[in-house]
Amino acid sequence: MQNFWNTVSKYPIFLTGIILGVFLNALKPLAPLLKNPVTAIALIGTFIAAFVFLGFTLRAMLGVGLT
């Protein structure tokens, strides 16, 4: 039974590694865009707008903050 729990305890580390690898590979092509100030501002603005949009969408879907 100890061997079972030893194996199960390794799964969160494996999952974290997979998620981190996906994010790093998704963001790697965007790194050269950060060297030019104009595209860096546009890229950062796009990320901020995406997070704000996601926040507003989740608030509306879940009914959070509505009176």
Image: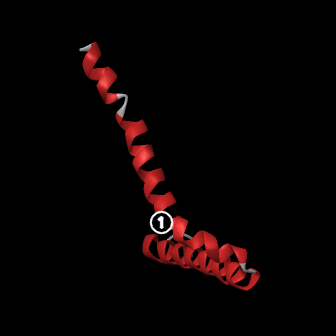
Q: How is the image coloured?
A: secondary structure
Q: Between 45 and 57, which is closer to the camera in this rendering?
A: 45
Q: Which amino acid does the dot numbered 1 rest on?
A: Ala
Q: Residue at x 43, y 52 (%)?
A: 19
Rendering coords of residue 59 (x, y %): 51, 72
Which part of the image, by quadrant, shows the C terminus? bottom right
Question: Residue 31 is drawn in which quadrant?
Answer: bottom right
Rendering coords of residue 5 (x, y %): 30, 22
Q: Is residue 62 visible?
A: yes
Q: Residue at x 63, y 79 (%)?
A: 43
The residue identified by callout 1 is: 26
Rendering coords of residue 42 (x, y %): 67, 84
Q: Residues within 10 Å of mark 1 (few under 14, many from 20)?
A: few
Residue found at the very far right of the displayed protein: 37
Q: Is residue 60 above or below residue 25?
A: below
Q: Is residue 66 visible?
A: no
Q: How many marks?
A: 1
Q: Is residue 47 above or below residue 12?
A: below
39 relative to 14 in the view: left or right: right
Q: Between 17 and 37, which is closer to the camera in this rendering?
A: 37
Q: Residue at x 30, y 26 (%)?
A: 7
Q: Between 20 and 50, which is closer to the camera in this rendering?
A: 20
